[in-house]
Image (tube, helix red, strand yellow):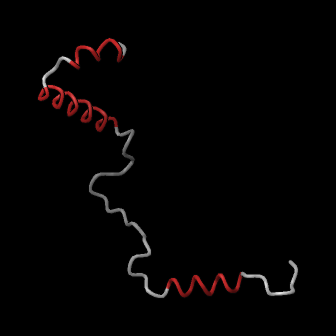
Amino acid sequence: MLLTEVLPTVQQLSRNDKLHLVRILVDELDATNEIAPFEPNKVYHIYTPYNMYGVAHLLMEAFEKAKPKEGKVE
């Protein structure tokens, strides 16, 4: 069945029925596990620069070391 065939019927539904339909479709998508490769109840660590004091200084030092010296051709 094509979306163009279903859409006119869906548009005639009440607001509550549309919400119910959305929930059904989301549950169906969630059940396929194609959109969320994460395992349930597993902890995933996210690494960010937040509270990483001193990292900016180390990064600046790395840039200074990598910068070509004046008069030196590489």
The N terminus: image quadrant: top left
- Tell which of 4 and 29 is nearer to you: 4
**Rendered image quadrant of residue 35:** top left
Picture residue at 24% right of the left edge, 35% below the top: 27
29 w.r.t. 62: above or below: above
Picture residue at 52% right of the left edge, 83% below the top: 56
Picture residue at 56% right of the left edge, 86% below the top: 58
**Left or right for 72, reference 39:** right
**Left or right for 35, reference 18:** right
- Tell which of 1 and 39 is nearer to you: 1
Q: Where is residue 54 in the image (x, y as percent from the top left)?
A: 48, 88
Picture residue at 54% right of the left edge, 87% below the top: 57
44 w.r.t. 37: above or below: below
Q: Position of residue 38 (x, y in %)?
A: 36, 51
Q: Where is residue 49 in the image (x, y as percent from the top left)?
A: 44, 75
**Left or right for 58, reference 7:** right
The C terminus: image quadrant: bottom right
Q: Position of residue 10 (x, y in %)?
A: 23, 19
**Rendered image quadrant of residue 26:** top left
Q: How many marks?
A: 0
**Left or right for 33, reference 22:** right
- Tell which of 41 and 27 is nearer to you: 27
**Rendered image quadrant of residue 48:** bottom left
